[in-house]
Structure formats: structure tokens, C-alpha cells
Amino acid sequence: MEKTPTPRRGFASMSRDKQQAIARKGGQTAHQRGKAHEFTSEEARAAGRKGGQSVSADRARMSQIGRMGGLRSAQRRRDQGGKGNPDAQ
């Protein structure tokens, strides 16, 4: 049996602009009705802290991220040839 491609329906069949327009109207309506949640600075801070803790719990991944950042930084310095850094030889 051959699988035939599933036709795109609903949001998938719409252009990105049309999807955004519909989503925007939904958000505006939620705010008008008082149903939309707006984070306080304390709630946002707590959410950021929670996300940071979950990411940093994986020490191997954190090490990998740091290594990639160091490699990119070194590559950028090599590409610039020391331009803008008076201490570079």
C-alpha cells in the first residue's frame, strides 16, 4: 500500500500571515475579556530561575555549551586578526 500525502487542513493550509492574524485576534480578545495572564516581574523571575535550574542540572550539556562558546570566541578573534584589540600581536 502506498501512502498518499495527507492534505493540509486547518492552520496548516493557511499562509503564515493569516495564521498570525488569527492568533493576534485571539490574544487581543483574551486581554479584553480579562482572561489573558500577564506575568508580574516576580513570576517572570521565578520562571527564568526554574528554566535555568533545569538546564544547568545537565552538567555535561553545560560543559558542551561552554566549550562551543569558547571555540566560537577563539574563531572570531582569529577571523578578526586581532583588530580592535591593542594587546593583540
Image (cartoon, rainbow, N blue to C red):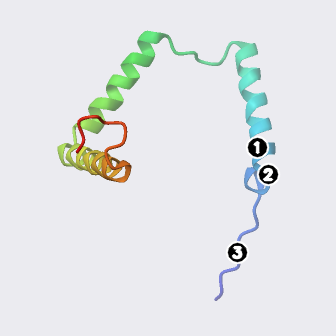
19 vs 71, nearest the viewer = 71
**Residue at 70% over, 79% down:** 4
Q: Kindly identify the amino acid type of the residue bearing the numbered disc 3.
A: Pro
Q: Residues within 10 Å of mark 3 (few under 14, many from 20)?
A: few
Determine whether 6 is above or below 38 in the image: below
Determine whether 55 is above or below 28 in the image: below
Residue denoted by label 2: 15
Mark 1 and mark 3: Cα distance apart in space: 22 Å
Residue denoted by label 1: 19
Q: Which numbered marker is on residue 86? A: none
In the image, which is nearer the foreground, mark 2 or mark 3?
Answer: 2
Q: Is 52 on the left or on the right of 89, as rendered?
A: right
> Which element carries disc 2, helix, strand or loop?
loop
- The x, y position of residue 74, in whole percent, is 27, 49
Q: Is 29 on the left or on the right of 77, as rendered?
A: right
In the image, which is nearer the foreground, mark 1 or mark 3?
Answer: 1
63 vs 43, nearest the viewer = 63
**Residue at 76% over, 67% down:** 7
Mark 2 and mark 3: Cα distance apart in space: 19 Å
Q: Kindly identify the amino acid type of the residue bearing the numbered disc 2.
A: Ser
Q: Earlier in the sequence, mark 1 or mark 3?
A: 3
> Which element carries disc 1, helix, strand or loop?
helix
Q: Tags 1 and 2 in contact by the CB under 8 Å rule? A: yes
Q: Residues within 10 Å of mark 2 (few under 14, many from 20)?
A: few
- The x, y position of residue 46, in whole percent, is 37, 18
Q: Earlier in the sequence, mark 2 or mark 3?
A: 3
> Which element carries disc 3, helix, strand or loop?
loop
Q: Kindly identify the amino acid type of the residue bearing the numbered disc 1.
A: Gln
Residue denoted by label 3: 5
Total numbered badges shown on the rendered structure:
3
- The x, y position of residue 81, in whole percent, is 33, 50
Image quadrant in which the N terminus is located: bottom right
